[in-house]
Amino acid sequence: MQTNFTLAQLADPAIETVNGILRSCVHCGFCTATCPTYVLLGDELDSPRGRIYQIKSFLEEDRPPTAEEVKHIDRCLSCLSCMTTCPASVHYMHLVDHGRAHIEETYKRPLLDRLTRAFIALLLPRPGLFRWMLIAGSLARPFRALMPQRLRTMLNLLPPKLPAPGWADRAAVFRAEHGPAGKRIAMLAGCAQQVLGPQVNEATVRLLNRLGVEVVVARPAGCCGALVHHMGRTEASHAQAKAMIDAWIAEVDGAGLDAIVVNASGCGTTVKDYGHMFRDDPAWAEKAARISGLARDITEFLAGLDTSDVRTPETVAVTYHSACSMQHGQQIKDPPLVLLRNAGFAVREPAEGHLCCGSAGTYNMLQAELAGRLKARKIATLKATAPDVIATGNIGCTMQLAGDAGVPVVHTVELLDWAAGGPKPAAMN
Ligand code: SF4
Ligand code: SF4
């Protein structure tokens, strides 16, 4: 694709990067066929290629985007299905991230939008505050019919029952039981997940300890920055990422780490991208790249361990739903399937596995209508496989699917922990 940035614009390293991405696109349009919003809406402006043109336009002209352009960029799920499909390896993720930061800096959204976004950005990355708001939301739920649409959408996403608190107060080091691995890893405790699904961290620690791995939760055990990063809030996301980088570097330089294990694939995609996020910051570039180099999804890390003793105690049909951040963002496809199959589960995969379930971080709160259509489509393909349980590797997908799937939705690691001698996932009881 031809670009027309001026030399002055290209002196900005961020624009130089964007220019390289834009020039790599040969506008073949292969990506449109696998883009969920194009599949639903059939509008070129809601396709990857259409969005690439719109981002190019407002960046080249160095102007605020129009309301129409913002509408189409906002509708993008950042599912990155287009990156898996693209034959020219266009790095759409870095392009849309930059486009979103530009929107955030230059475009004034309507007041209600600004308030909603500020509320989400304040709340979700802070587990303590988030938990209190969930409790308040549960109390308000019976009155949701009286509330504005936006608030109703958020209340509809609340889990029917809030898990008990406590993860944040747990010990920071979990010693290995026994076993051959002898490794030491840091686990990202996460933000929303430690409130909505504390059992995922518990299963991760139990399983790794049983396999001979020491687990450390580096303090402050905060948010990796992914949630606000995808909202274009660069300053906030960089501050959160820097806190995690410093905490992990202290562990790397102290007792040492074999890996940084992440059990929410949306977060894993961002931690693996820290090197890129801080590439032009001399004070952080090297540290960030080291952390990205150590980041592993939990299934990626488990694939390198001896799991031959991990065997399911029951015959269970598991349909594996691959989160977009897992299959497209991190290109992790086989490890979760192989681990589950090797543990004796009867593993099934749904049709249209490449399409997003509509969760996509904060998307189901901000784009409820499209998210609902994608969810209905995903639920239908999952149900068609007649599973006993659905496994996935991202808390956002779990929350999106759990209420309507008709069967329990659990994290892959909960099943593997059960197969290794841990408790049966509570959702399956
Ligand atoms: S598939 Fe790749 S090269 Fe083709 S239009 Fe889409 S982004 Fe551009
Ligand atoms: S990230 Fe997903 S929704 Fe966005 S353009 Fe690419 S395929 Fe479409």
Image (spheres, rainbow, N blue to C red):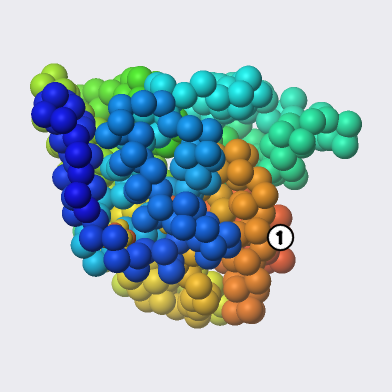
Q: Quadrant of ligand 2?
A: bottom left
Q: Quadrant of residue 385?
A: bottom right
Q: Residue at x 35, y 47 (%)?
A: 53
- Density class for disc 1 (Cα within 10 Å; few <14, some 14-19, many ≥20) is some
Q: Residue at x 41, y 64 (%)?
A: 32
The amino acid type of the residue labelled 1 equals Asp
The answer to whether the beta carbon of the residue marked 1 is less than 8 Å from any atom of ligand 2 is no
Q: Is residue 191 left or right of residue 279?
A: right
Spot occupied by residue 330 in the image (x, y as percentages of width and height):
31, 55
Q: Is residue 171 left or right of residue 11?
A: right
Q: Quadrant of the C terminus?
A: bottom right
Spot occupied by residue 214 in the image (x, y as percentages of width and height):
29, 43
Q: Is residue 227 left or right of residue 197?
A: left
Q: Quadrant of residue 405?
A: bottom right
Q: Residue at x 36, y 26 (%)?
A: 63
| Residue 387 to residue 392: above or below | below
Question: Which sits in the foreground, 181 or 359?
Answer: 359
Question: Which sits in the foreground, 301 or 393?
Answer: 393
User: Which residue in the protein does label 1 denote?
Assistant: 404
The secondary structure type at the circle numbered 1 is: loop
| Residue 335 to residue 282: above or below | below
Spot occupied by residue 130 in the image (x, y as percentages of width and height):
60, 27
| Residue 318 to residue 145: above or below | below
Spot occupied by residue 384 in the image (x, y as percentages of width and height):
63, 79
